[in-house]
């Protein structure tokens, strides 16, 4: 059965997805990680065999369903739809006709989803688990495990049975269920024996119980009295130290004398006033110090000069002083730039041969149109001049005399020689073809492989017979069939002989292990145990009937009861022995029966193998006769099919080479005839006499010489004609260029008359002239601009100096003689003594000697004005800062003075209150107050301790009269009380020990009396014993059943291996050879190892599975699974096989072999591969180009 297509709806990430497999034997579903490959795998499986109940809905909550189309092995079309539900809704059709669900399940081999995944699903984890299980598996378990979906399933089942049997019973165990039950039965038997007492012992037990209770009551009363007395003594021991402390405190308190009315309140008031006084004094001292310092600072402030209404002007001039410094730097830079500009202007004047830049030069300008026209004239003039010079050089070259064309001294060229070239080419081609054919014929005749083939073929030819190409040899397909049949029969015969030898050895070994005689008593154990159990039950029932009737129970003597107990114990012991023997014999009987069955099975197997060997030998003889008849018409010495198949291949190759050699001989003859025909044609057409043994190469050389002579002559004539024509054209062009040069020169001369320059500039340098005139105008404009800037800066500096001088005069006139001394020492006054007050504005020449000296004097006056303005600004700022400090200090002094006055008033009030308190405490001054305060505090502490003692004593007195109890306590002696407490403690300990012994005796006697009084104890113990023995019988039965199941499982494995091992083993070998690329070719039993498995390689070396590499064991496990799937498909409807990334751990070589084996699997088996690896895609595309590839 193969999948045509599967459509999934609302399954995982697929809202609707169709997988079109087209019933292909091999299909690859390829997708990267997170592309839905796992969802596709689950969808394919669940669409066939049912949706899981807990599938996650990733799509909107809609019905999950699938549509499946299958192609059965007989070509029928099976289709069905499946909708998810608590029970999936399935509708199936076969060839368009509806079929019931039971019929669909029959087509699906009655498998569910888990069974299908186990048997026909492969994954990487399963492959790893399978190869791990192969390490210690025998061959039979491995073959059966292929039918259970893996060896681990069989091993798990066997392990579960072994564990269950061990949990039930173990020969020397203590925790198994049957062992625990046996121990409980033994304990119950001992308890039953102890529960049986005689009636005569009841009276003594009751008397002893009454005596023990009376003694216990007396001990209780003694214990109560001693305990009460000891409690009182303990209170006295605790109260005596407290009483003594109270008396001492009262004495100390009486010794302290205090004035009347002095208490803790008065002490607290004195302490608070003292703290307030100290705090105010420290704060007053600190505040007075700060106040004195601020008053000194206020007095130290001197009066600053007040500029009055000129403050704003002073501040403005002070700020402008900084600007004037930068202005002086700017003025110096402008003078330097002016000097540079004047130098550049003078240089341009010298270049243009001008003395100065007058108004005519400043007014002269060239428009853009004129400039472009002059530049174009200059460019055109240079181009025309260059072209004229080039023409002159060309004319000189052409006017050089040439040698006349000499007459050729060679013989004249034939007129018809071009018609001979095709004939010569044909002859050359014929010669090459003939030489190639001859060389090929010689090479083929001397071929070493052809000679070797002939020698190999002659070995099988009958003497006196030559090789021929038309012998009636058989076809290769027939010979291959005979070869496969020969190999199959030989392999089968060898395997049967090996199996016969192994089975015979196993039969002989089983017969040696069989005991001489069986356990004859084993069959009677169950009957004896049943009879013994019935006797024991009858005895117990009769005894219970007697005990339940009081009259009959009184007549039963002690000897009779003892005899019954002895008889019952003997029956129980005998039953235990029989039960143990039964448990021990069950295993031995099962082993004995199993060995007998094994001997019979091996004997049948030997007979069957012998008959199969005879059949294979007879079939081999028939095959050999058919093989001889096939070669009857060929005179050959017959060999094996493999040898004759190789001979047939060599014979086919020899025939092909003989045909090629004959064909080459015919080609040589044809080439020779064609070449001779073309030679005859050339002899007739050639203009000269040719040698008889001429060649095509000599003729081609002659034709080439004639053609070269003709081409040289024609080329020389054409060159002379072209040279004359070119010379005439150059003469005409020269006249035209000269006229153009004259026109350009005249136009340039007209414009040059308008230029105000004394010299004439050539036309080639007209651009330099225009650029020089433009630069001259720009430099002259720059000089004028710099002179204007210098005048502006000078004007600003003069204004600033005048403003400072004017303000200085105003301040001097307002301040009078008080400021004259300061005025005379200022920088401005020093400069005024040297420079008169005149206008320092400069114009005209900016870089002359007089201007330089004037600038130096003006600079000195400006610096003095700047310094004066900065001094005034600093005085103004200092005056403002001093005024602000004066205001701040005045306000702070006033505020602190108020604080000092207030604190002094408070301090006087506190001192007055302290004087009152000192008088109240009877102290003449404050120095005596600390002693009084100390006495008050000590008296308060003593009173508090005395009160605590009184409270403790009242608590200890309890409900007794406090005063009487206190008088009694004062008369007691502490050592005597302590001695009495120790005596009472010792007495209580003794009483406790005696009471404990009495209670234990009472408990024991009470239990014995209760056991005797309750006649049902022995009955309950007996019933419990019967129940335990019944449970033991059930456990024994369960153990026998599970032991039998283990035996049946083992026999089933052996039976399946015996019935199907040859077929499965052959298929396993074939698949293992394909999967490993022929490296490992055989799987067989290891002799003497109880069915252990061996793997044989191509070098006949054997390896146990645990010695193989992990990858090889995975391939062996895959071969076992593929063998069983093929076997299942031969006997049932084939089902698709789904493999999910099983080859991740395989290298490229193993992966290629594995994919090749899967691609060449049985045609009725469909394999679906899922992978995310590019190499799997590439290999599948290479090995199975027709395999569909579904990309996710």
Image (spheres, rainbow, N blue to C red):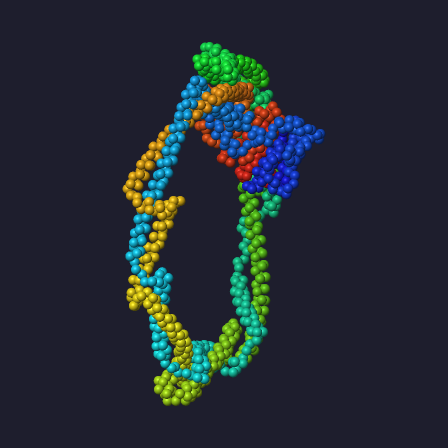
For residue 1003, above or below residue 836: above
Is residue 1010 depicted above or below 535 in this figure? below
Q: Is residue 1091 visible?
A: no
Residue depicted at 50% across the width and 82% down the height? 358
Give the image quarter of residue 193. Answer: top left
One can see residue 745 in this view: yes
Q: Position of residue 588 (x, y in %)?
A: 47, 16
Horizontal side of residue 846 vs 717, given as left or right: left
Residue 668 percent coordinates (x, y): 57, 32
Residue 538: x %, y % from top left: 51, 14
In the image shown, does 204 or 420 lie closer to the viewer?
204
Quadrant where the image shows the C terminus: top right
- The count of marks equals 0
Quadrant placement of the N terminus: top right
Q: Residue at x 33, y 36 (%)?
A: 985
Is residue 286 rendered to the left or right of residue 627?
Answer: left
Q: Quadrant of residue 990?
A: top left
Quick one: 376 or 832, which is closer to the camera?
832
Residue drawn at the location 60% of the way across and 35% of the way down: 52
Q: Position of residue 1064 (x, y in %)?
A: 54, 23
| The one of 648 and 86 positioned closer to us in this rendering | 86
- Viewer-proximal residue, 648 or 336? 336
């Amino acid at each position: 059965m193969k999948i045509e297509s599967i459509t999934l709806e609302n399954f995982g990430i697929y809202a609707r997805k169709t997988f079109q497999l087209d019933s292909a034997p091999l299909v690859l579903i390829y997708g990267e990680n997170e592309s839905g490959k796992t969802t596709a795998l689950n969808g394919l499986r669940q669409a066939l065999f049912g949706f899981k109940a807990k599938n996650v809905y990733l799509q909107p909550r809609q019905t999950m369903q699938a549509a499946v189309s299958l192609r059965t092995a007989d070509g029928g079309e099976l289709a069905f739809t499946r909708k998810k539900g608590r029970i999936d809704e399935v509708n199936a059709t076969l060839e368009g006709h509806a079929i019931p669900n039971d019929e669909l399940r029959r087509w699906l081999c009655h498998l569910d989803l888990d069974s299908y995944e186990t048997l026909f699903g492969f994954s990487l984890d399963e492959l790893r688990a399978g190869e791990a299980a192969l390490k210690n598996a025998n061959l039979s378990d491995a073959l059966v495990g292929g039918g259970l979906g893996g060896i681990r399933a069989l091993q798990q089942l066997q392990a579960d049975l072994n564990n269950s049997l061990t949990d039930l019973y173990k020969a020397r165990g203590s925790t198994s269920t049957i062992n625990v039950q046996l121990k409980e039965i033994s304990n119950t038997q001992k308890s039953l024996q102890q529960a049986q007492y005689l009636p005569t012992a009841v009276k003594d037990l009751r008397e002893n119980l009454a005596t023990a209770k009376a003694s216990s009551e007396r001990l209780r009363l003694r214990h109560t009295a001693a305990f009460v007395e000891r409690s009182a003594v303990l209170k006295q021991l605790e109260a005596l130290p407290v009483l003594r402390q109270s008396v001492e405190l009262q004495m100390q308190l009486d010794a302290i004398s205090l004035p009347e009315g002095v208490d803790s309140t008065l002490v607290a008031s004195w302490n608070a006033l003292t703290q307030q006084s100290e705090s105010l004094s420290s704060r007053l001292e600190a505040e007075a110090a700060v106040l004195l310092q601020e008053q000194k600072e206020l007095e130290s402030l001197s009066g600053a000069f007040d500029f009055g209404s000129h403050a704003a002007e002073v501040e403005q001039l002070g700020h402008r002083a900084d600007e004037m410094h930068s202005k002086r730097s700017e003025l110096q830079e402008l003078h330097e730039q002016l000097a540079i500009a004047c130098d550049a202007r003078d240089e341009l004047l010298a270049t243009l041969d001008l003395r100065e830049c007058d108004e005519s030069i400043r007014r002269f300008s060239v428009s853009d149109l004129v400039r472009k026209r002059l530049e174009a004239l200059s460019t055109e003039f240079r181009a025309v001049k260059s072209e004229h010079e080039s023409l002159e050089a060309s004319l000189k070259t052409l006017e050089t005399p040439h040698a006349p064309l000499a007459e050729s001294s060679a013989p004249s060229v034939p007129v018809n020689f071009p018609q001979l070239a095709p004939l010569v080419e044909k002859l050359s081609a014929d010669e090459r073809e003939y030489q190639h054919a001859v060389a090929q014929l010689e090479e083929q005749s001397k071929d070493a492989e052809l000679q070797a083939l002939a020698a190999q073929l002659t070995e099988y030819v009958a003497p006196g017979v030559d090789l021929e190409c038309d012998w009636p040899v058989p076809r290769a397909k027939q010979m291959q069939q005979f070869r496969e049949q020969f190999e199959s029969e030989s392999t089968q015969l060898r395997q049967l002989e090996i199996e016969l030898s192994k089975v015979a050895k196993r039969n002989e070994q089983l017969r040696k292990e069989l005991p001489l005689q069986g356990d004859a008593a084993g069959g009677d154990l169950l009957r004896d145990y049943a009879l013994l159990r019935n006797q024991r039950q009858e005895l117990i029932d009769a005894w219970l009937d007697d005990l339940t009737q009081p009259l009959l129970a009184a007549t039963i003597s002690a000897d009779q009861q003892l005899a019954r107990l002895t008889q019952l114990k003997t029956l129980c012991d005998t039953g235990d022995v029989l039960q143990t023997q039964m448990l021990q014999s069950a295993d031995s009987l099962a082993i004995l029966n199993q060995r007998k069955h094994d001997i019979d099975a091996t004997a049948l197997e030997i007979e069957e193998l012998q008959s199969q060997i005879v059949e294979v030998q007879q079939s081999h003889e028939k095959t050999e006769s058919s093989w001889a008849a096939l070669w009857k018409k060929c005179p050959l010495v017959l060999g094996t099919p493999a040898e004759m198949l190789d001979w047939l291949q060599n014979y086919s190759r020899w025939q092909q080479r003989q045909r090629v050699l004959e064909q080459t001989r015919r080609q040589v003859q044809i080439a020779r005839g064609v070449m001779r025909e073309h030679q005859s044609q050339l002899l007739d057409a050639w203009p000269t006499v040719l040698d008889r043994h001429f060649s095509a190469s000599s003729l081609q050389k002659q034709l080439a010489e004639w053609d070269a002579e003709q081409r040289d002559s024609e080329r020389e004539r054409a060159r002379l004609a072209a040279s004359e024509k070119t010379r005439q054209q150059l003469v005409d062009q020269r006249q035209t260029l000269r006229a153009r040069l004259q026109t350009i020169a005249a136009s340039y001369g007209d414009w040059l008359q308008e230029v105000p320059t004394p010299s004439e500039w050539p036309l080639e340098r007209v651009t330099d002239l225009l650029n020089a005139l433009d630069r001259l105008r720009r430099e002259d404009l720059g000089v004028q601009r710099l002179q204007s800037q210098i005048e502006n800066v000078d004007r600003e500096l003069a204004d600033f100096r005048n403003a400072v001088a004017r303000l200085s005069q105003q301040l001097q006139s307002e301040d009078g003689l008080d400021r004259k001394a300061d005025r005379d020492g200022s920088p401005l006054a020093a400069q005024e003594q040297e420079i008169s007050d005149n206008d320092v504005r400069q114009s005209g020449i900016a870089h002359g000697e007089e201007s330089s000296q004037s600038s130096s004097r003006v600079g000195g006056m400006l610096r003095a004005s700047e310094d004066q303005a900065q001094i005034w600004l600093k005085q103004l700022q200092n005056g403002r800062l001093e005024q602000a400090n004066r205001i701040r200090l005045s306000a702070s002094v006033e505020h602190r003075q108020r604080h000092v006055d207030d604190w002094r008033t408070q301090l006087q009030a506190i001192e007055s209150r302290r004087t009152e308190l000192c008088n109240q405490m009877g102290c003449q001054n404050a120095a005596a107050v600390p002693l009084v305060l100390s006495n008050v505090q000590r008296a308060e502490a003593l009173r508090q301790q005395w009160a605590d003692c009184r409270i403790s004593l009242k608590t200890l007195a309890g409900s007794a009269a406090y005063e009487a109890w206190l008088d009694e306590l004062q008369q007691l002696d502490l050592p005597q009380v302590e001695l009495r407490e120790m005596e009472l403690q010792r007495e209580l300990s003794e009483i406790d020990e005696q009471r404990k012994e009495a209670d234990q005796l009472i408990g024991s006697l009470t239990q014995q009396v209760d056991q005797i009084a309750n006649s049902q104890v022995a009955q309950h113990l007996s019933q419990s014993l019967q129940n335990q023995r019944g449970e033991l019988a059930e456990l024994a039965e369960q153990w026998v059943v599970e032991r039998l199941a283990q035996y049946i499982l083992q026999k089933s494995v052996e039976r399946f291996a015996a019935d199907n091992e040859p077929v499965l083993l052959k298929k396993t070998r074939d698949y293992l050879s394909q999967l490993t690329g022929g490296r490992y070719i055989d799987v067989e039993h290891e002799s003497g190892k109880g069915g252990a498995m061996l793997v044989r390689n191509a070098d006949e070396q054997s390896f146990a599975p645990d010695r193989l590499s992990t990858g090889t064991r995975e391939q062996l496990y895959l071969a076992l699974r593929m063998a069983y799937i093929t076997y299942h498909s031969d006997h049932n409807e084939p089902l698709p096989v789904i493999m999910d990334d099983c080859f991740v751990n395989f290298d490229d070589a193993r992966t290629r072999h594995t994919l090749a084996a899967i691609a060449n699997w049985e045609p009725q088996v469909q394999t679906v591969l899922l992978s995310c690896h590019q190499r799997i895609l590439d290999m599948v595309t290479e090995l199975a180009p027709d395999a569909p590839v579904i990309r996710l």
